[in-house]
Image (cartoon, helix red, strand yellow):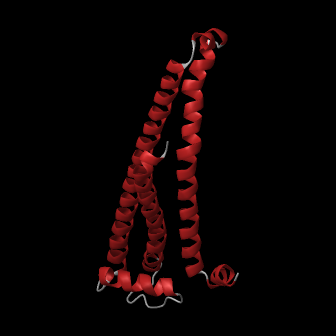
Amino acid sequence: MVRPYWGLLAAGLATTTVASVLDGFVLIILIPLLKHLFGTSGALRTGSTELEAWVDRLVDPLVAGLSPGAAAARLVVVLALGLLIKNVLSYASTQITVRAQEGLVRDLRVRLFDHLLTLDLGFFQRTRAGQLISALITEVDQTKTVITASLVSLFQNLVVVAVTLWVLSQISTLLYSLVHLG
């Protein structure tokens, strides 16, 4: 039943992944922003980890020759753009996933209705109408939640946790040794 929607689900997971990575990017951009806000000006080459050195290489062209206040303002714009893109991708992911979910629900209900049309009249005399309506509405919606919404949410949360742990391990040498040395 899910096979026709693999493309949509993959697109939803891809946009979710990119949005989650942008969450990490926003966290990373806070490093030079806080350095500029709290008085570290000029070159940002004081980083002690690979992440900070990478951020310095990324941010230096944006803030070269600017006063600390102007550099902080430019970094706030970059931060706002990162948040905007992340939120647009999160919205797109939700819309794509909902499209797949609703298509799956429609297909399930059509199959159930087609099956009901093949049943003999005795089945309908033994079964209450409320049970049939409940099966067609409630149980199909629960199936949708289990199959699509829960899986997408699980994947998104795993990516967010992995990105956040990686960023934090790059910021903190103690956390880095705990994550990488095990």
Res. 123 image quadrant: top right
Quadrant housing residue 171: bottom right
Q: Using the image as rendered, state which of residue 171 and residue 3 is in the foreground.
A: 3
| Residue 94 showing in the rendered view | no
Residue drawn 48% across the image and 24% down it: 114
* Residue 161 shown left or right of residue 31 in the figure: right
What is the x, y in percent for residue 182? Answer: 70, 81
Q: Residue at x 47, y 41 (%)?
A: 101
Query: Which one is in front, 55 or 75?
Result: 55
Query: In the image shown, does 145 or 128 lie closer to the viewer?
Result: 128
> Which one is in front, 16 or 130?
130
Q: Position of residue 122 (x, y in %)?
A: 62, 10
Q: Residue at x 31, y 79 (%)?
A: 62
Residue drawn 47% across and 74% down? Answer: 28
Count numbered badges in the picture.
0
> In the rendered image of this protein, does residue 40 appear above or below residue 129?
below
- 42 up-or-down from 93: above or below: below
Residue lying at the far top of the rendered structure:
125
Looking at the picture, how far across and down is residue 149, in whole percent? 54, 45
Residue 83: image location, x then y, percent:
40, 61
Q: Is residue 131 visible?
A: yes
